[in-house]
Image: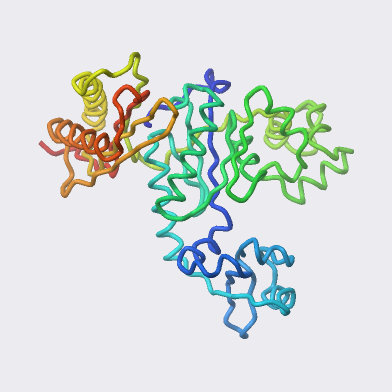
Amino acid sequence: MNENISLNDIGKRIIFHIDFDYFYAQCEEIRKPELRNIPSVVCVYSGREEDSGVVSTCNYEARKYGVKAAMPIRLAKSKLKDVEAIFLPTDKPYYQEISRNAMRIIQNYGELFEQVSVDECYMDFTKITNSDFDDARIFAASLQKNIKDQIKLTCSIGVGPNKLIAKIASGINKPNGITVVSQEDAKRFISNRKIEDIPGVGPKTSKKLESLGIESISDISKKSIFELRDSLGYKIATFLVNASNGIDYSQIKVRGTSKQIGKIVTLKKDIANFEQLKMTADNLCKSVYENLENKRQAFRVLTLILILVNLQHVSFSKSLKLYSASFDELHKNSLSIIHEMISNNSISLDNIRRMGIVVSDLKDISGQD
């Protein structure tokens, strides 16, 4: 969505960190499913000699033999010398295409989105879950299933009250896992992790902490910022003390101008007929169109989202042939998509709990009449 959450609402946030599992190697498995059951290693070859270079990533079959990222290719081959294994060069254009498809599915959920690399992103699910961590777990499972069903890709999802906790949580139950950490559990959760698990803490900072007698996150939480600032600097000291207490104020960074505009509402009562659903769609279209008009933008992709009473998430996107800044175009296509979604998915109207409309692939129309 296009609305930021104020720092006053930090404690109410629900943030997802979505991490595609062993991404490059999994992309190769999608292309060639037979690779799933044999050690498969994706490598960055230097070109100097046949085996010169390093491992970029590998599947879990290869990891059983001790192969890991950044390992020299020669060493990886020696570990796999007694088994059938596949060594492949990277194919970044192909991986980027898989990434784009997966990110598009995630963005269709219609909340604040931040892609941080080809295989990971953050998403703010505060509004769509009504700040309910039980609902968040169900949404995470729905998101996982949608990605797997549509492009055969698995991901691990960390759910937390902030980006820090969500990021750490996503690495707990890999692959294809979901880890949910509520606001109340955040401090206890992070106190059981290693200092190196805090994103951004490298060997240099770890050595400084060791010299201060600090060996665990729990040790950091007992210190004040002022006790650490002389050795670490005020910025790092503040970050670490906050992190050790499960606190992170950083916001989802939407890159550039808004890439999508949308609104999701919870239905106050069960829908009895299509006319009632149409009234909700009318109001959503008006809200989205008003936002488009204020920003002087046109859209080309329209996504409808229905969330059912069991929290199943059903979405459908339509790409227009041309960019449009017309309310009639938005409204007409929205109603058409709703009809199609309900009939194709055999959805009972009284099972619809929430509804959303999102426009994306936006274009600035400032200066046009």
Does 268 sit above or below residue 134?
A: above
Location of residue 55 by image quarter? bottom right
Instruction: Identify the image's colour scheme: rainbow, by chain, secondary structure or one colour.
Output: rainbow
Measured as percent of width and height from the top left, residue 156 is found at 57, 46
- Asked if 23 appears above or below 359 in the picture, the reply is below
Report how many numbered discs are placed on residues in the image: 0
Residue at 69% x, 63% y is 63
The quadrant of the picture occupied by the C terminus is top left
- Residue displayed at 23% across by 33% down: 338
Residue 162 as seen in the image, left or right of residue 216: left
Instruction: Where is residue 56? Give x, y as percent.
Output: 60, 66
Residue 276 sits in which quadrant? top left
User: Horizontal placement of 144 versus 248: left or right?
Assistant: left
Q: Is residue 94 left or right of residue 357?
A: right
- Indicate the quadrant where residue 173 lies: top right
Q: Residue furthest bottom?
A: 49
Q: Nearer the viewer, residue 3 or 69?
A: 69
For the view shown, which residue lies furthest in the left direction?
Answer: 369
Measured from the top left, where is residue 280 in percent x and y? 25, 21
Compare residues 27 and 227 and report the one nearer the observer: 27
Viewport quadrant of the N terminus: top left
Instruction: Give the percent coordinates (x, y) of residue 18.
Output: 53, 44
Give the residue at the far top of this rendering. 269
